[in-house]
Amino acid sequence: MINSPKKRVEVCFAPTQYELYRADYKICVVIDVLRATSAICTAVNNSTKILPVSTVEEARAYQKKGYLAAAERNGEIVEGFDIGNSPFAFMDPDLRQKTVVLTTTNGTKAINMAKDMDTVVIGALNNLDALCAWLIEQHEDTLLLGSGWKDKFNLEDTICAGAIADQLIKSGRFKAEEDSTIAAKYISRSARDNIFGYLKASSHRRRLKKLNLNEDILYCLTPNNLDCIPILKDGVIEKLTPEHVSQKA
Amino acid sequence: MINSPKKRVEVCFAPTQYELYRADYKICVVIDVLRATSAICTAVNNSTKILPVSTVEEARAYQKKGYLAAAERNGEIVEGFDIGNSPFAFMDPDLRQKTVVLTTTNGTKAINMAKDMDTVVIGALNNLDALCAWLIEQHEDTLLLGSGWKDKFNLEDTICAGAIADQLIKSGRFKAEEDSTIAAKYISRSARDNIFGYLKASSHRRRLKKLNLNEDILYCLTPNNLDCIPILKDGVIEKLTPEHVSQKA
């Protein structure tokens, strides 16, 4: 085991570059720190399942069929929906054991794009250490996919991806070859001790601040307040359990 | 003048994202540190003009018409050409007052992509301070376009773009809003004191090292050994002179 060859861990900044990076990875970690994947971790921790869809139209169609649905665009709850992508909304005990359809500006698009991978899991700062421990245990070629902001690079997803890459490389079982991974690692190290301050100037934080979402931002930038790993299975995101792993083996 | 509104300076990591970023910038700085734009700065400093073309076929067609031509792909000189994109080749006194057609893996593609901008200039670490002083004087919305490596993000172009953005913002006459610019600035600051060491792990340096191009790398990573500004005019890159500015005004 100790001498087994190193697997790759690489960072892809945004879905627009996914085709350039996807290659032969086995596991894809989708990251949208502000706020889709932080909300999904929170939901799954609350025993809620998430059905991610790319468009508001799809979410409405599910809503008509009687599903609970949540929709966010440009930081705001879409008209006709009760929930957007605030993690706090997904702490509601009434949502336990239920499935919520979710569409967001960036995150759910990235999740659906990554569906062709063997395994898709959801990463956020909230579940950072638990996710890293699991990824190290799996020891597979792993792609960390940032959701970006409207196809552009974003800072918070890169900080999270860089922190994951850093832990995996430090385990001695992974290596990185892409410049994007090296850059993400450096950025996450320099942000680590004060992520909130580091992101002060970031475009997305400014957007959310305008919408009075500082509470959400603080929550999403808190590492390791959750230890669940959301996994995509048959189109639905649920909490990873020992059964998922035994099914795989 | 002191109270005039700040102009934008932003970083676009690679040509694949150009369409997302291009917006209403007046000046585009094309950067391909290893090695196209470092070679172009060296050529222009040697009073050589460069005619950038995107494909090897175009370069061959010019060659048949009697032009001097240089072609590089994957770090190596293309068969049938005497010169690739090593800066040292462009120090040749025989090239003075001549025009050389040039095609490279990434840099010339980026230059041709940026042609729709009002003004296209060439940036490298070699002409960093001279270029920054000129850009500050122009005081126009400025896009810094990295050439990347085969459409992917690369570290050395980002370090150079970040260093330019940093100087422009420090002048008090520019501001940045994109996360890519904030990230590039941070990366360039942490690399600044030891760019060679910082790039040790970078993918492109590994590629060039295999080809025994360490001398080239050292040259390309030397800030401010040149003070010329190459500018694209009617499809040809030449040294910026006071006439260019007066023509514009």
Image: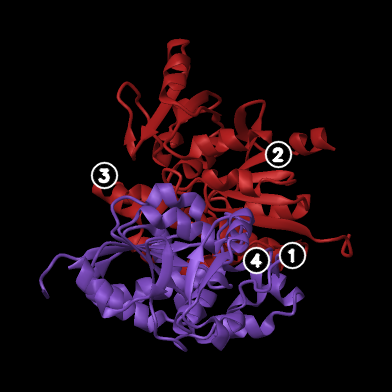
Chain colours: A purple, B red
In the rendered view of the protein, which quadrant contains the N terminus of chain A? Answer: bottom left
- Proximity of marks 2 and 4: CB atoms separated by less than 8 Å: no
| Secondary structure state at the residue bearing disc 4 | strand
CA distance separating discs 1 and 4 = 9 Å
Looking at numbered disc 2 in the image, what kind of residue is underneath it? Thr
Q: Do labels 1 and 3 share a chain?
A: no
Residue A72: give its label. 4
Image x and y of residue A79, in percent: 74, 65
- Proximity of marks 2 and 3: CB atoms separated by less than 8 Å: no
Image x and y of residue A211, in percent: 75, 75
The residue that label 3 is drawn on is B211
Neighbor class of circle 4 (other Cα within 10 Å; few <14, some 14-19, many 20+) is: many
Image x and y of residue B12, in percent: 58, 52
Q: Tell me the subunit letter for badge 1.
A: A
Between tags 2 and 1, which lies in front? 1
CA distance separating discs 2 and 3 = 35 Å
At x 47%, y 75%, the residue is A124
Residue B119: give its label. 2
CA distance separating discs 2 and 4 = 39 Å
The residue that label 1 is drawn on is A79
